[in-house]
Every structure is written in structure tokens, then in C-alpha cells.
Amino acid sequence: MFEANDPNSIQLTADGQLRHFLTTEGLPRELLIEILDTADSFVDMGEQQVKKVPLLRGKTVANLFFENSTRTLSTFELAAKRLSADVLNLNINTSSTKKGETLKDTLMTLQAMHSDMFVVRHADSGAAHFIAQHVTPNVAVINAGDGRHAHPTQAMLDMLTIRRHKGDFAPLKVAIVGDILHSRVARSQIHALRTLGVDEIRVIAPKTLLPRHIEALGVKVFTEMASGLRDVDVIMMLRLQKERMQSALLPSESEFYKLYGLSRDKLAYAKPDAVVMHPGPINRGVEIESEVADGPRSLILDQVTNGIAVRMAVMSKAMSGQLSQRAATDNTSREA
């Protein structure tokens, strides 16, 4: 477990530009809106004949995934390539870290290869903060998920998906359902939703899958679906993180589905125009019914499309902030 200090002293330049993207917690609303606006401009790029812009031309992005991933890794790779970057995917299973090389040595080696950005997924909470602060502060670090702590690009692609379908955040009631206890996605979603000013955030889960003192994050807690989903505008389902469960927190998957799985019957508790989201991968028949996941109110595939755009926005902004910081440092050195 790494120590995470004040993230914004690490994430932002002196004039408030993004230089690392480690967490949504504490970032100003204006910056989140800026990321969403930039991402909006990239969304339709997939339909163009030439799917590239030169914003990261000549830059090298290294994807360092110490945990398995399909969607996140592939969308980060695609986002970097659409920004015209050179992309290096480090296979951790065959890398020198398996031969005893430390994380710091691996990163310093990659920095010596003149990498400009690290996209990091790690099982330990605070890993991305540690890298950005203590190891390679002059390389832009994007947190692609660290332990139970944060998954900021997932939260921002969810925010973009909500905004594109619901418009203004202010009147919305949002429910986050499922394994809140182990979910880095839920934490990042809650921080982003609060900053963007939604009317109400609800979490719905069995007591065994709720963190202690979750109310301190400004959410309303429910332990059953009927009352929790009543009149909500957005339902954000979560994956059951069975790989992080160290004891019997659930009686069975079938029991969980009966009480907390999103079926058409339970969806009827929400508003008639409520939309359904899920970060993937989906456990059908456990977290959500196939008819709901594939139904007209599901935005799950939109989330994947929006994920590429959000990651393009975050990467281009972080690189711009790093270049701005270097220029400011160089000017200060010359004046001294």
C-alpha cells in the first residue's frame, strides 16, 4: 500500500493545468467540465475517414498494466494512437518485474527511453500517486485504476455518457448499485458526481458490501432496490469484485441477483426514462439481466465509445500541462 498525499498538489501545475490524472477527488468543477468539453469534440472521430489528430505526435506513451484488463487497456491504446503517439504496451508477465526488478527500476528504465507518459494500472492503492510524486514527476502519469482507490477515467467517461444523454447534471438523481466496498469506480464516480453538482447520489448494496462511513462522501445509503431506485434518473451498476473478496461477503450469486441484480421488474422502480450503465465486464444474470443490458435504456456500449474520447482528452491535457510545467521550470532556471 502506497501513501497518497494531497492529490492536487501533484496533479496540477502552478497555474491549475492538469499534468497527471490520478483521481477525480478534489479537482475543480471547471476542470472536469473542460475535460468533458474536450472529450465531446473527440466523440465523433470514430466515424471520420481519418481517425487521427496530431496532438501527441512524436510522444511515447507506455501502458503499464500490473492487473489484467481488456477494455481499459485497448481504449487507452486506441486513444493514444488517435492522438498520433507512439505506444508501448509493457507485458508485465514477461517483463523484468517478474525477475525481481522493482517497480521504480522499471519506471526509471522506461523514462531513460524518453517515454513521455505512463498509463498505470496497479493492484495497490496509491501506486499512481507514488509514481507521479516520487519516481517520475516529469512524465505524465494517468491512473488506469489503483487497488480499491480510484479509476478516474472510468468516472469521467461515465460523466460524459450521462451528460450526452441527460444534459444538465443539477436535477439528476443517480443510484450506484452493487459492490461498493471493493469498487474504485464507485469512489471516483461519487467524487465526480458531487463536484458536477447532481441533486442526489444514492448507493444501494447489501451491508456486507458497503464501506463503513460511506455517508461521509455525501451519499444516501439504501440496502434494498425498491426504495433505492425510486424516481432515479441514472442507474450505475457495478461489477462484483470476486477477486478482491477475502471472505464470504455474499450468500451466493443467485441470491445477490435476486435481491440486487437489475432486472426489468426492478428497473420499473426508476423513472420511465432512466438510463442504465455498467463499467464492464458484465456478469449477466448476476449483476444485470441480459434484456436490460441489451435493452433500449442501456448505455453500456456508449460508455465504451465515450471512453476513447475521454482518454484522448485526459492524455492531451496532461501532456500539455507537463510541457507547460517544463517551460516554466526552464524559464525559472534561466532567470536564476
Image: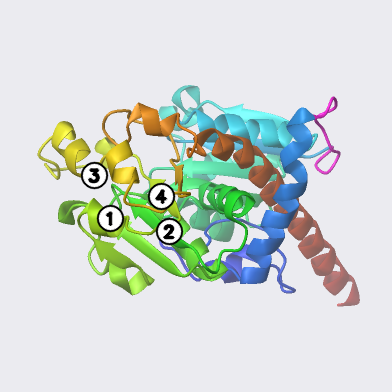
The reply to whether callout 3 and callout 1 are in contact (CB within 8 Å) is: yes
Residue 174 image label: 2
Residue 204 image label: 1
What's under tag 1, amino acid-wise?
Ile
What's under tag 4, amino acid-wise?
Ile
Which quarter of the rendering shows the N terminus? bottom left
Q: Mark 4 falls on what kind of element? A: strand
Q: Mark 1 falls on what kind of element? A: strand
Give above or below for 150 relative to 5: above
The reply to whether callout 3 and callout 2 are in contact (CB within 8 Å) is: no
Give me the C-alpha separation between circle 1 and circle 2. Answer: 11 Å
Q: Mark 3 falls on what kind of element? A: helix
Give me the C-alpha separation between circle 3 and circle 1. Answer: 8 Å
- Residue denoted by label 4: 235
Q: Nearer the viewer, residue 162 or 336?
A: 162
The stretch of residues the image draws in magenta is 48-57
